[in-house]
Image (cartoon, rainbow, N blue to C red):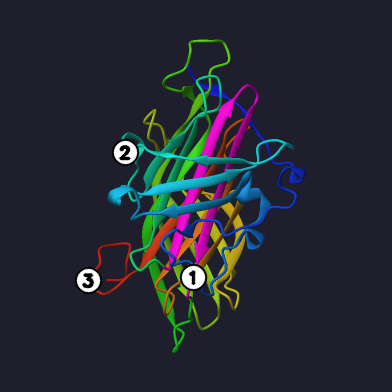
Amino acid sequence: MHRILSAIFCAGLLAGCGGNPLADGGGGGGGGGGGGTSTIPLAIRGNLQSVNYDPAGGGGAGTLTAVIVPLDASPITATFTRNPSLDTPGFRAFTFRETTANRYFVALLARSVDGGTTAGVVGSAQFAEVVWGANYTGSNFTKPVSGGLATYHGNYAGVLNKGVVAPGGGGGQFDAVQNDRVQGKVVVNADFTDNALEGAIYERQNVDTGDTYNDLLMTITTIKADGTFEGDLVHEPRGPNLGSFAGAFGGAGGSSVAGGVDASLGPDLIERGVFLAEKCVMGDPLPCPQ
């Protein structure tokens, strides 16, 4: 049976947050392009203070360590375990639980081919609240010299504030919940002459239940000089604003883009997610230019 829990958004939970979220454990996280904790809106970064993700660690399986601020006490530094059974397209899954009586964290992480961008979302649910957050980075960003238009296509991964009892629980009334995962695709159109972008997250499906969801549309917003951006999110068919998105470009000429979203899907249903997309080149399939 699914349980729906409220999400923690109190700013006080993140007092003093710092670090380099989603830093490349192999040393590739430097350079411009933003994506540091201070540039990610609170509604998106939530309780996730920092992440160190090395996709080449663990013999190629990847390694993940995250600092999570769930309460007003000291942050939790968690070393996650690779869990391929929870992978979604384009994203590697990791899980963490200290004991069978504690929260069960699910993380979904991705990095662009050239290492210029990274994106990850972490979620857990137990008792009355969801503890979660999304982070992204863009490094070594340079704007295309000639400006112009560019299209990016890639994958989306999210978690919901609902799920089922996590595996390995003790069978008690307050067992931890494994958040439902959402998979989808993303397309972003960028205008580097006028420094603007728009896009959509589409073909969204609940991996755990099979339910499908409406597209999420990114309204037109400004690309800042450092390659970062943020704006409002709406449903398809277009309706009132239901949340927000933010992100960063990375790589030479803006070779990739990553970002996060926070979406209210109904009276009780909330989604936190991330996307990562590579720049289209001639010959790529739709929705890339033909």
Of residues 277 and 113, the one drawn nearer to the viewer in this rendering: 113
Query: In this rendering, does residue 204 appear at all?
Result: no
Magenta-highlighted residues:
116-140
Secondary structure under the numbered disc 3 in the rendered image: loop
Q: Disc 2 marks which residue?
A: 84
**Magenta span includes 117:** yes
Q: Residue at x 75, y 46 (%)?
A: 11
Query: In this rendering, does residue 190 appear at all?
Result: yes
Rendering coords of residue 2 (x, y %)? 50, 20
Secondary structure under the numbered disc 2 in the rendered image: helix
Between disc 3 and disc 2, the foreground one is 2
Q: Disc 1 marks which residue?
A: 139
* Residue neighbourhood size for the residue with mark 2, other residues' Cα within 10 Å, grouped as few (<14), some (14–19), many (≥20): few
- Label 1 with label 2: CB-CB less than 8 Å: no
Looking at this view, name the residue that lies furthest to the top: 172
Q: CA distance from mark 1 to mark 3?
A: 26 Å
Q: Disc 3 marks which residue?
A: 283
Q: Residue at x 65, y 41 (%)?
A: 75
Rendering coords of residue 81 (x, y %)? 40, 38
The amino acid on which the numbered mark 3 sits, given as a three-letter code, is: Gly
Secondary structure under the numbered disc 1 in the rendered image: loop
Determine whether 163 is above or below 228 in the image: above
* Residue neighbourhood size for the residue with mark 3, other residues' Cα within 10 Å, grouped as few (<14), some (14–19), many (≥20): few
Looking at this view, name the residue that lies furthest to the right: 12
Q: CA distance from mark 3 to mark 2?
A: 31 Å
